[in-house]
C-alpha cells in the first residue's frame, strides 16, 4: 500500500501541486509512497506560522511545555509497527534498526521534557540589588535533517528547541521522509498550532528559503560539510545562530594490547556496518597495531562474512541496501576506484535468498587491506559498507594519522588498559571519542554530541544542547549614583 504524506503548517495538513515518489531501495520497482514537492511559498508559510505561534508558546510556563514534550516523546517511543515497517521500506535499514531509530527519537524528546530545569534562570541577590540571568528563547528556529536517520535527528532538534520556548520548522530530507512526516504530524497535533511545522522539498529551494528567511533566528542543520558551508554563508545575511552537525571520517585505533574477543569483534562490526555504514559516526577507518593486524583481519573477516544483505523487512537480513541513487552511485564509483588503484579488497557477506540484486541499491560489505592513507577510501568520508584497515607501529603514529583529517566527528581507542586509552582519547581531535566501543548505542543522554574542526559547531543531546536554543538576558536592579 502506498502512503501519502502531507506537510504540517500552522496545525494543518498542507499539500503541494506536485508530489514526489519514494521508491523502496530494496525493491526499486515498488513505490512506498508520495510526499508533497514543497515550494519556497510553503517555507514562507511555515516560518509565518511559527512566528505567529511564538509569543504564546514562549510565555507558556516551562513546566507545561515540558509536560507536552513528555507526551510527544511517548507517542513515538514505543515505535509503532506500521512506522517501523514504513521506515524500513523507504530507508532500507533492517526492522530492528528502524525500531531503534524511532524509539531513540521518542526517548530523546521525553528526556528534554523531563528536565524543565535546563531552562532555569540564575538569580544573584546581594547588597547591590537583584540580578536575574534569564534564559530566553530565540524565536523561530529551523531544523534541517538528512536521509540517514531523519527520525532521531528531527527529535534531537524538537526536544531542546521547544523546551526552551522556541517554535520550529523541520525540513525533512528528499529521500525517505514519509515516516518522519507522519510521526511529526501527530506530535504537532499535540501542541498549539504553529509550534511545530514540517515542510518537504528540495534543499537548495525549500531549505535555502528557510535559512535565508529574516525571521529565522537559528538553524540547526545535520548533513554534509559542503551544505553546512552554504548554510553558514546564508545564515550570515541575518546573523542566524547555527548548530551544524556535519560529515565525519571516524577513525578507530586498536592498540597493541586490544582485547580481540568475540564481543569486541561484534562491537567493531556493529560500529562499522550499522545502517550499511551510512551513520555519521560509523567507523570509517580502522588503524590496528601491526603486531595484531593478522589476528584482527582474520577475526573481522570471519565476522563480517556472516552479514546477510537484502531487503531490511526480512528477518534474516542484517544489512540493508544503500539508501538512495545518489549515495549508491557515489559508493559504487568509490569501490571501483579503490579496486582500480590496486587495493586488496575482500568482498564478504552473502545475499539473503531471493534478493533481487538488480532491483535494489545493494552492496556487499568489503574490507580493504592496508591501503595508503591518501587513497580516497581512507582520506574522504565514504558512508558505505567498505572498511579500510591500516597498520601502525607506535601510538604516536596512530594518533597523528587518525587526526590528519579536516573532519572531527567521532573516534575511538581500543585497549585493555583504560587509562592508556583515556590518555590517547584526550588527544583525539573528535567531538565524540569512545573507548572500546564506537556506535550510536555508545552515546549517552547526559553527554553532548557534536563535531570539531569541519564536522560542525554546537551540540545535540544533553543539557548543553538547550544552550544552543537560548539567549541570555541579564535583568538587574543594581543602581548607581
Ligand atoms: P545533504 O547536506 O545533502 O542534505 C542534508 C539536508 O540539507 C537535506 O534535507 C537537504 O534537502 C538539505 N539541503 C541541501 N542543500 C541545502 C541548502 N542549500 N540550504 C538548505 N538546506 C539544504 O546531506 P545528506 O547527503 O542528506 O546526508 C549525509 C550527510 O549528513 C553526511 O555527510 C553525514 O555525515 C551527515 N550527517 C551528519 C550527522 C552528524 O550528527 N554530524 C548525522 C547524520 C548525517
Image (cartoon, rainbow, N blue to C red):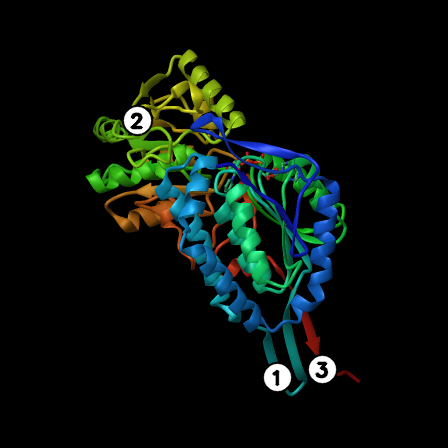
Q: Confirm or reject: label 2 Cβ below 8 Å from ligand 1.
A: no
- Marking on residue 8: none
The crowding category of the residue bearing disc 3, from other C-alpha atoms within 10 Å (few below 14, some 14 to 19, many at least 20), is few
The crowding category of the residue bearing disc 2, from other C-alpha atoms within 10 Å (few below 14, some 14 to 19, many at least 20), is some
Whether residue 244 sits left or right of residue 92 in the image: it is: right
Visible residue check, residue 451 = no
Residue placed furthest toward the bottom? 127
- The residue positioned 52% from the left and 51% from the top of the image is 183
The picture places residue 384, in percent across and down from the top left corner, at 43, 29
Q: Nearer the viewer, residue 225 or 279?
A: 279
Quadrant showing the C terminus: bottom right
The crowding category of the residue bearing disc 1, from other C-alpha atoms within 10 Å (few below 14, some 14 to 19, many at least 20), is few
Quick check: which quadrant has ligand 1? top right
Q: Which residue is mark 1?
A: 125
- Marking on residue 477: 3
Q: CA distance from mark 1 to mark 3?
A: 10 Å
The picture places residue 229, in percent across and down from the top left corner, at 64, 38
Q: Earlier along the polypeptide chain: callout 1 or callout 3?
A: 1
Q: Which residue is mark 2?
A: 352
Visible residue check, residue 84 = yes
Q: Earlier along the polypeptide chain: callout 1 or callout 2?
A: 1
Query: Circle 1 — which element?
Result: strand
Which of label 1 and label 2 is nearer to you? 2
Whether residue 405 sits left or right of residue 260 in the image: it is: right
Q: Quadrant of residue 209?
A: top right
Whether residue 384 sits left or right of residue 50 in the image: it is: left
Query: Circle 3 — which element?
Result: loop
Amino acid at each position: 500500500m502506498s502512503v501519502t504524506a502531507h506537510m504540517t503548517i500552522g496545525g494543518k495538513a498542507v499539500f503541494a501541486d506536485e508530489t514526489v515518489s519514494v521508491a523502496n531501495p530494496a525493491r526499486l520497482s515498488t513505490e512506498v509512497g508520495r510526499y508533497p514537492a514543497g515550494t519556497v511559498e510553503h517555507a514562507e508559510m511555515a516560518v509565518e506560522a511559527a512566528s505567529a505561534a511564538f509569543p504564546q508558546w514562549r510565555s507558556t510556563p516551562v513546566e507545561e511545555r515540558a509536560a507536552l514534550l513528555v507526551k510527544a516523546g511517548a507517542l513515538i517511543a514505543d515505535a509503532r509497527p506500521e512506522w517501523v515497517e514504513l521506515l524500513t521500506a523507504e530507508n532500507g535499514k533492517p526492522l530492528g534498526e528502524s525500531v531503534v531509530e524511532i524509539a531513540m527519537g521518542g526517548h530523546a524528546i521525553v528526556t528534554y521534557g523531563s528536565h524543565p530545569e535546563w531552562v532555569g534562570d540564575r538569580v544573584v541577590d546581594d547588597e547591590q540589588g537583584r540580578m536575574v540571568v534569564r534564559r530566553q528563547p530565540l524565536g523561530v528556529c529551523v531544523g534541517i535533517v538528512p536521509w540517514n536517520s531523519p527520525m532521531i535527528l528531527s527529535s534531537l532538534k524538537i526536544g531542546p528547541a521547544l523546551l526552551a520556548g522556541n517554535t520550529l520548522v523541520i525540513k525533512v530530507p528528499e529521500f525517505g521522509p514519509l515516516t518522519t512526516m507522519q510521526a511529526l504530524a501527530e506530535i504537532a497535533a499535540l501542541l498549539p498550532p504553529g509550534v511545530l511545522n514540517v515542510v518537504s522539498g528540495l534543499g537548495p529551494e525549500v531549505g535555502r528559503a528557510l535559512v535565508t528567511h529574516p525571521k529565522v533566528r537559528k538553524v540547526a542543520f545535520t548533513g554534509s560539510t559542503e551544505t553546512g558551508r552554504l548554510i553558514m554563508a546564508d545564515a550570515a545575511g541575518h546573523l542566524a545562530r547555527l548548530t551544524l552537525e556535519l560529515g565525519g571520517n571516524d577513525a578507530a585505533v586498536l592498540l597493541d594490547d586490544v582485547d580481540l574477543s568475540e564481543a569486541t569483534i561484534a562491537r567493531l562490526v556493529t560500529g562499522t556496518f550499522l545502517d550499511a555504514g551510512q551513520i555519521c559516526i560509523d567507523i570509517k577507518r580502522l588503524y590496528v597495531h601491526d603486531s595484531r593486524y593478522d589476528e584482527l583481519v582474520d577475526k573481522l573477516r570471519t565476522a563480517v562474512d556472516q552479514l546477510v544483505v537484502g531487503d531490511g523487512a526480512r528477518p534474516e537480513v542484517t544489512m540493508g541496501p544503500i539508501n538512495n541513487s545518489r549515495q549508491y552511485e557515489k559508493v559504487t564509483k568509490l569501490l571501483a576506484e579503490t579496486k582500480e588503484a590496486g587495493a586488496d579488497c575482500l568482498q564478504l557477506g552473502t545475499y539473503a535468498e531471493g534478493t533481487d540484486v538488480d532491483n535494489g541499491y545493494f552492496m556487499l560489505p568489503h574490507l580493504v587491506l592496508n591501503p595508503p592513507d591518501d587513497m580516497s577510501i581512507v582520506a574522504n568520508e565514504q558512508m558505505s559498507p567498505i572498511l579500510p584497515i591500516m597498520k601502525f607501529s607506535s601510538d604516536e603514529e596512530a594518533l597523528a594519522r587518525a587526526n590528519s583529517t579536516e573532519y572531527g566527528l567521532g573516534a575511538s581507542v581500543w585497549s585493555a588498559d583504560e587509562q592508556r586509552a583515556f590518555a590517547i582519547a584526550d588527544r583525539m581531535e573528535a567531538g565524540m571519542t569512545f573507548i572500546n566501543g564506537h556506535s550510536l548505542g555508545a552515546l549517552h543522554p547526559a553527554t553532548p554530541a557534536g563535531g570539531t574542526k569541519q564536522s560542525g559547531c554546537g551540540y545535540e543531546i544533553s543539557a548543553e544542547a538547550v544552550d544552543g536554543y537560548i539567549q541570555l538576558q541579564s535583568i538587574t536592579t543594581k543602581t548607581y549614583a
